[in-house]
Amino acid sequence: MPASRSHFHFDELLRAVMRDIFGEFDEARLAELIPRLSTVELAAGQVLVCEGEQSDAMYIVLSGRLRACTGVGERTVTLGEISRGEVIGEMGVITGKPRSATVQAVRDCVLMRVGAADVEAVLHTWPNVALPLMRKLLERQARINQRATEQRRVVNVCVLPITALKGGSTSELVAAELRAQLEDCLQRTEGTGQVALHTYAKLPQAFRDKDWEQSGSRKRRIAIWLDEQEQQHRMQVFAADPGDTPWTRLCIRHADTILLLADADAKPHLTPLEERYLMGEAPLSRAAQTLLLVHPDQRPMPAGTRRWLAPRPHLGANGITHLHLRPVHAGDWARLGRILSGHAIGLVFAGGGAKGFSQLGVMQALAEQGIVWDMAGGTSIGAVMASYAAMDLPHDSIVRHARRAFMRNPTRDYNVLPLISMLRGRRLRAVIGDAVADAAGLNLHAEDLWLPFFCVASNYSQARTEVLRTGPLATMLTASVSIPAALPPVLWKGDLLTDGGTFNNYPVDVMRDVGAAQVIGVDLRNEVYRPLTITRVPGPFAMLVDRYFRAKSRRVFADIPSLPTAVMNVALLPSVAHDRKMREMVDLQFVPEVDNVGLLEWKRFDEVVQIGLKHGRTVLRQSGNEGMVRQLRRASLSAAVHAEELLDSDDTLATVPANLSHV
């Protein structure tokens, strides 16, 4: 086990965690227990405990981040990440059962070890702490079970340049602006939260020694100083050097998230720095990595992002492989701040044929209230509408493009020989292809959208949900809307894909997994049940007369679905129970009243958009939603871009405390 060092600056955190575990200990009890603890230091990549080992101790995380996993090799499953102030292994110590997971350091960590014998001694000496201890453990287990819907809390962000930037911009300028945006976001969403900026140029003079990596005492002083900074700040931003320097390596080792900063127009090859420290079996850090591509300010839409992602398949451990940034766009900076600080807003759209046009109306209602979204996703027609939401276009432009595409009736090409599907699907493919090309350009890939995007399809070949995040956008959308039997399946990487509504018509859970802290959802299924008043199911001739020779207001069998409509509805039935659970995971829910809109009534585009707009305005005005609407509006605000003046200021930079002079 690595050597220990003095950690007097962790006393307050340590005492708070001990009280959380053992209840309200008085100072005398704490003073007796704390000397029994031992310090453990881990470098990034080191394993703390292994699955199946005897539970001989529990650990308190004082600084750093660790990752818990089960299984081995391809069957490894990540359970979650553990950060400052959390406890590892307490259940095993109390129950005597073996370790349930392997825990590995994501970055350099400092922990306190409490041996199983010491825990037993506490229970024997002070038996009255047993009940509070069990209560705390049950509460902690409940929180662990809920982590699937919680946002990963990032503390340290490393801005690592992998190419030069145009216009004299540097990683220091980007880091300075990012620090300002993070602090602004935290002030608006959490009411507090200081963010420190660390650059080598502003590093305290006492640490600016090119040989400090070879000096054990100097290295220890820097580590203790950074530990203190982490205790004092909600987040920290590290601006790494462009090359392989001791400062760059330190920034990488202390990061929870590494932003790979690159000019989008540069050559996308891997750099020696990435190959040496961020890849392979023993990287310098196991922190999540996200590519941050910087674009010219007037670029209408990114292009060629896949060239950057191809040599970096390890990106996206936190659900997002890349982000796009236009330096003078305040909205891009605000989005980056929300995503990194754990306050991202996700927009999710359910499937439902022509009913989905109402989602455009809800988007307009949100925009009227100043509410934005940082990522978008959906299923079937909801995927198409979500792709528009991820293009970051003016709303009137989105509506114009969608109207032009879908007023052509994409489901009119019936198959003469329906061996695979009732519809040929060529018209649908053409409509979606033209819709994408008209709005954003030919051959657009999903990774080229300004906002993170996903759509859901059903993998017919493997009988599972398929979440699509990268690839040709038109093909992805066509797969997501291809209802089995009604439309032909789509070939994708050797598998057949069909409409995502079979398994997950309302993918709120996918949005949570991507990292959205607040989710705005638009479902299209109204749960109101209306029994039929007819006494028999009509035959073909009666249906023909009723549908084509009676006025709409006098139809007797209006509630009997046509064959295409029945096929489409049946395809969505398996996900009904799942969709009900998804509604419980949404923070702001919209269900437009579109029951009387047929799945294939494409000509009612403008009417359905207005239904969504009216419903959206109504929901946003409801008294029960006031708190969430206020919270979303506050989070949606954008701060001014002012990196250079911030970089020149000293008030965002930390100083060396006098009490480190003796270390």
Image (spheres, helix red, strand yellow):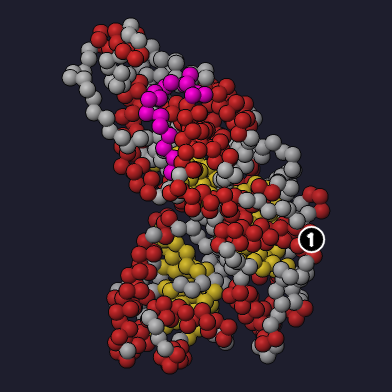
Residue in the foreground of this view, choosing between 644 and 193: 193
Q: Secondary structure at mark 1?
A: helix
Task: Classify residue 445 by image quadrant.
Answer: top right
Residues 571 and 196: in front is 196
Above-or-below relation of 440 to 425: below
Magenta region: 589-607
Number of numbered discs: 1
- Report whether residue 271 is seen: no
Task: Assess disc 1: are there few (<14), some (14-19) or many (≥20) residues with their C-alpha within 10 Å of its C-alpha.
Answer: few
Q: Nearer the viewer, residue 162 or 342?
A: 342
Task: Find disc 1 in the rendering and name its residue.
Answer: 645
Residue 441, given in percent of the width and then of the height, sits at 64, 30
Please state if 318 lies on the left or on the right of 576 as rendered.
right
600 magenta-colored: yes
Image point (41%, 56%), residue name: 148
Q: Residue at x 22, y 15 (%)?
A: 538
Q: Report x, y in % for residue 507.
A: 42, 43
Q: Is 247 situated left or right of 451 in this image?
A: right
- The quadrant of the picture occupied by the C terminus is bottom right
Q: Position of residue 40 (x, y in %)?
A: 50, 80
The residue shown at (63%, 51%) is 637
Is residue 648 in view from this perspective? Answer: yes
